[in-house]
């Protein structure tokens, strides 16, 4: 059975508030307070393969959007001994700007893109401000161009990406939002991507403020809780700074830049 080493690469951060980040925070009758978010992508290595899950935002785009880039995502990969141009597969969980901002660096990769994401973000309805604000037009066009060039493989539903790696569509945050299940020596990792940004979302059933479908988001929480209750399973939210405290820094990496999830 295939087992993978999984590293979370932390490349950016945001200082914000709970009112700004959670959906209708006032519903809970609690005072506002500070809430930080970190930005991650993932490296899966094992069974003779390397798969990168998402690739972070373009630093210039992140700066324009008020995010603090701690390290260039491409440079971070190289510090881990990975040449992005040599990565054979880039698994994309959804098409928001902070997940596809460095596609050009992965010039040799097959792009694994959720079919629902590609069809939605290239459709006219995606151009409405409340959707389009979360993507970069040039980046969506890069994905569309890669599809025309034959570099995109679409997937959806429940898909075995490779032995020991399964993607599962939950929607909610983005129309085709995926989570990724990875078998490791210690058990199964549930990489939620943006189906769960912060531990509090899942533990208290409090949806994030950016959502395409509220019902799907809640149902996604239920799915992730069920998966996380399986023996040996560990759920990893996509943006929680707590990840840097719950997992150790990879040996030889700058403190907090690369976290050893398995």
Image: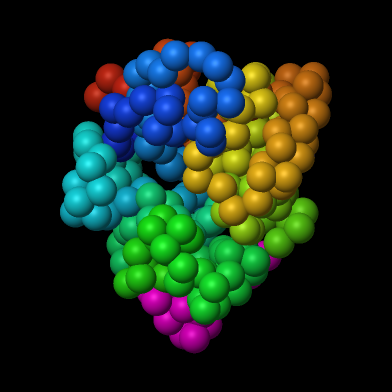
Q: Is residue 91 left or right of residue 37?
A: right
* The stretch drawn in magenta includes residue 146: yes
Assess whether residue 198 is covered by the magenta stretch: no
The answer to whether residue 149 is above or below residue 76 is below
The quarter of the displayed image where residue 81 is located: top left
| Residue 148, placed above or below residue 176 | below
Q: Which residues are magenta?
A: 141-155
Q: Please name the residue shown 35% across and 70% down the image.
A: 137
Residue 235 locus on image (x, y percent): 63, 26
* Quarter of the figure with the C terminus: top right
Tally of marks: 0
Q: In the rendered image, is residue 109 in sight?
A: no
Q: Residue at x 50, y 45 (%)?
A: 210
- Left or right of 221? Residue 120 is left
Q: Position of residue 11 (x, y in %)?
A: 30, 37
Nearer to us in this view, 219 or 235: 219
Nearer to us in this view, 139 or 8: 139
Instruction: Tell me which corner region of the image, top left, top right, bottom left or bottom right, holds residue 201.
Output: top right
Q: Would you say 258 lies left or right of 207 here? A: left
Q: Front-most of 249 and 17?
A: 17
- Point out the image quarter for the N terminus: top right
Q: Residue at x 53, y 33 (%)?
A: 24
- Taking 138 as reference, is 261 above or below it? above
Q: Is residue 232 visible?
A: yes
Residue shown at 77%/33% (left/top)? 222
Q: Horizontal and vertical percent for residue 213? A: 65, 51
């Amino acid at each position: 059975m295939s087992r993978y080493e999984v590293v979370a690469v932390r490349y950016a951060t945001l200082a914000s508030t709970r009112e700004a980040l959670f959906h209708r925070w006032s519903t809970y009758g609690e005072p506002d307070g500070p809430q930080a978010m970190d930005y991650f992508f993932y490296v899966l290595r094992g069974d003779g393969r390397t798969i990168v899950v998402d690739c972070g935002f373009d630093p210039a785009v992140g700066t324009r959007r008020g995010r603090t880039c701690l390290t260039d995502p491409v440079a971070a990969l190289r510090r881990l001994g990975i040449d992005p141009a040599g990565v054979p597969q880039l698994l994309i969980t959804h098409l928001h700007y902070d997940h596809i901002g460095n596609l050009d660096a992965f010039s040799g990769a097959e792009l694994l893109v959720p079919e629902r994401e590609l069809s939605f973000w290239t459709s006219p309805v995606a151009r409405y401000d409340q959707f389009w604000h979360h993507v970069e037009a040039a980046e969506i066009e890069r994905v569309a161009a890669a599809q025309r060039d034959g570099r995109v493989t679409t997937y959806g539903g429940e898909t075995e990406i490779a032995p020991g790696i399964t993607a599962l569509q939950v929607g909610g945050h983005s129309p085709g939002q995926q989570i990724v299940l990875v078998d490791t020596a210690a058990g199964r990792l549930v990489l939620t991507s943006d189906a769960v940004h912060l531990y509090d979302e899942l533990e208290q059933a409090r949806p994030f403020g950016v959502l395409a479908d509220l019902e799907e988001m809640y149902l996604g929480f239920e799915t992730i809780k069920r998966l996380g209750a399986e023996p040996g399973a560990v759920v990893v939210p996509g943006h929680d700074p707590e990840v840097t405290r719950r997992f150790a820094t990879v040996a030889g990496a700058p403190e907090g830049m690369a976290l050893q999830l398995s």
